[in-house]
Amino acid sequence: MGEPLNPRYRLYHPKWHRTRIPIFWWLRSFAYIKFISRELTSLFVAYAGLLLLIEVSVLARGEAAYGRFLAWLQSPAVLALNAFVLLALLFHTFTWLNLAPRALVLRVGKRRVPDALVLVAHYSAWIAASALLAWLILRR
Amino acid sequence: MRRSREPFLWALFSGGGMASALLLPAIAFLLWIAVPLGWVEGGSYETLFALVRHPLVRLVLFALISLFLFHWAHRLRYTLYDGLQLYHLNQLIAVVTYGIASFMTVVAAYILWVFA
Amino acid sequence: MPETITLEVQRYRPEDEAEPVFERFDVPFRADWMVLDALNYIKDNLDGTLSYRWACRMGVCGSCGMMVNGQPLLTCATYLERLLPGPIRVEPLKGFPVIRDLVGDITDFLEKLSRVKPWIVREEEKPLAEGEYLQTPEQLADYEQYSMCINCMLCYAACPIYELEPDFIGPAAIAIAQRYNLDSRDEGVQERLDVLSQHDGIWACTFVGECSVVCPKNVDPAGAIQRYKVAATADWFKSVLTPWANR
């Protein structure tokens, strides 16, 4: 064996190589981009929570205040924002419900409920909850 | 050692995640798109006011809004922590995210309490 | 069908190179060859100094996991044909420090694996005379999926959290902990929970889910970790709400 070409190498002394992780590591693959988008939907969950709170306080201030709030919601920029928020929330719903059977193990007696059934149950709950909300909000 | 706070925070995160997954698309679509655009009938001021005036509805709203905020706090904390590799700021990130969620929970309690 | 296919193989010879380099090899293309066969061809015919791990070449030993075109794969179970027209880029598993060429240092994984006590823990062994521990098919079904793990570490290479936080105990170790936790003969749940309920245990995981995607044995470590979180949370609430029942 000749002289080592790497001057920093000590003979018979292991020298591991560790790769550096780029700061934007989550752009490296489609799966990671999907993951980081899923995580960032939480921003819109918080936004929806706060907007709900604002709507409640507007309702408390009377019909005129609510009218102004509606006009604000109708402005194109706000509509566009809320349409985007809706898409993000839907992405959150689909990713959340699809992963639910992986985290939940339900049992009936000795048998484990199949994952497909857990999934169907979650989507049914989503539809039922949405129908209930539609009934509550759209009642006259 | 068993008194790690992670299980509690994770319970808030998943509770908020499940509640927002089931409820928020319908709320966002109806209240902030369909009603303002007049796509649907109903959703009038009287209906919504009567709805929120009910104490049970306000109690549920309080729980939901708080859960949404803790869901956000937990997810954002981990996103900042891993996504931007801010390991040295772990404590600060946790204090700020959960702090904001706690503060807004108090604000929500106040707004819903003084309603009507 | 092409006559040959090109492999770009990572070489790291610390005595000669400060950084890894890629070396190109043209190997004969054969429809029934796996990536591992191509590496063996290189070692036998082109460059005998190429270092990599392999043993069984039938997807059981878990030694030959490498990054193939950026994906963690068992090289013994990946057809060259799938990767046409090439070139095929072969790198060592991501997340482990590289000792030489395609060989990573897996000491960290082995240490973590032993930390979760991957064996049946009994408070008291029953005497041999009383016979074996019996188990029903339903009880076997509870953990069978997790017992398929071959320790190939593809899940570690797929996990961004392990790469970012080397202290994270990682997907396979947690799935294997679940394999024993869910075994009706085992009594080590609490001991493992003490290890795994730490931040470096289950809580560092944010359910990226890639570990389960790359698993060659469909173990679903990501699912195992989330189920563990549910169980640990239930355990936490139980110990808070009924403090008198604590150990």
Image: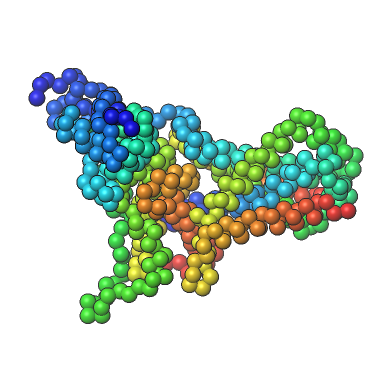
Q: Nearer the viewer, residue C36 or B16?
A: C36
Describe residue A30's horizontal placement relative to residue A91 as left or right.
left
Q: Position of residue C41 (x, y in %)?
A: 20, 34
Q: Is residue A42 above or below residue B2?
A: above
Residue B99 visible from this viewpoint: no
Residue that appears at 19% across and 22% down: C16
Q: Position of residue C6 (x, y in %)?
A: 30, 28
Residue that appears at 69% across and 55% down: A127
Figure quadrant of residue B101 = top right
Describe residue C98's horizontal placement relative to residue A56 as left or right.
left
Colour setting = rainbow
Describe residue C12's horizontal placement relative to residue C212 as left or right.
left
Q: Nearer the viewer, residue B39 or B3?
A: B39
Count of number-bearing discs = 0
Describe residue C34's horizontal placement relative to residue C143 as left or right.
left
Q: Nearer the viewer, residue B93 or C83?
A: C83
Q: Is residue A18 above or below residue C189?
A: above
The quadrant of the image that shows the N terminus of chain A is: top left
Q: Position of residue C181 (x, y in %)?
A: 38, 62
Q: Position of residue A34 (x, y in %)?
A: 53, 38
Q: Residue furthest bottom?
A: C129
Residue that appears at 35% across and 29% down: C86
Residue that appears at 52% across and 59% down: A115
